[in-house]
Image (spheres, helix red, strand yellow):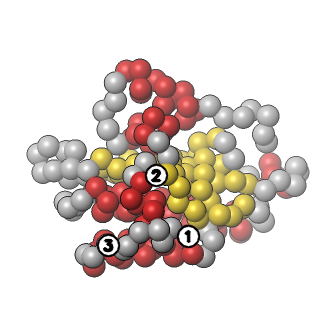
Amino acid sequence: LHAAFSKFNKTVKITVYTDADFAGETAERRSTIGYVIYLNSAPIKWTTKRIKSVTTSTFETECIAISEACEAVKEFIHLGQSLGIHIDLPVTIYNDNLSTALVATNQASSPKKKHVQIRFHHIRNFARNGVAEILHCGTTEMVADLFTKSLGRNQHYALAERMLEFDRNQP
């Protein structure tokens, strides 16, 4: 990484797409989260994970997805710093749940349940410290849907193509 970017004296932009499928698993009604992290415009990490505990709301599930993505971003920022690579901050984190994006940016009231508040404040601290900005993304552009739910063939192919589309002119 260092050789690739120091040669061009470039900064690195990290962009993240997160999504959650609330109670989609039918046997125990557990939720699934997923995210994809882009370095500049190339996907470098993607994950899907079934949450071990049962969540009680879509908001809670989306907060867990964003919080998990924030932890992964933090690792990439530390790696970049240790290699002398400048990471362009804030990192943009897209989520398709409008209420989660509004709450994370102080435009709505915070959750009442303590366990949700912990994840929520984790996300809000990232935003307040200028590390991340949480933005809303329409469902049709949410590439993280590939990791959280069953999609129709056309939507699956459209999102897969979108995920793998990147600017080959960048280093």
Using the image, determine if residue 62 lies above or below residue 24. Answer: below
Please name the residue shown 62% across and 31% down the image: 165
Is residue 25 rendered to the left or right of residue 136? left
Amino acid on which disc 3 is placed: Pro
Disc 2 marks a residue whose amino acid type is Asn
Q: Mark 1 sits on what residue?
A: 127
Mark 1 or mark 2: name the one nearer the start of the chain. Answer: 2
Q: CA distance from mark 1 to mark 2?
A: 14 Å
Instruction: Judge whether 138 appears above or below 157 on screen.
Output: below
In the picture of the structure, the residue carrying the numbered disc 2 is 95
Q: Where does the C terminus fall, quadrant-wise?
A: top right
Mark before the other along the chain sequence, 3 or 2: 2
Secondary structure under the numbered disc 2 in the rendered image: strand
For the residue pair 169 and 63, the one nearer the viewer reads as 63
Query: What kind of residue is marked 1?
Result: Ala
Nearer to us: label 1 or label 3: 3
Q: Nearer the viewer, residue 13 or 74?
A: 13
Marked residue nearer the N-terminal end (1 or 3): 3
| Residue reaching furthest to the top | 154
The numbered disc on residue 111 is: 3
Q: Of residues 53 and 133, which is closer to you in this image?
A: 133
Place of residue 147 in the rendered image (x, y in percent of width and height, measured from the top left): 39, 41
Disc 1 element: helix
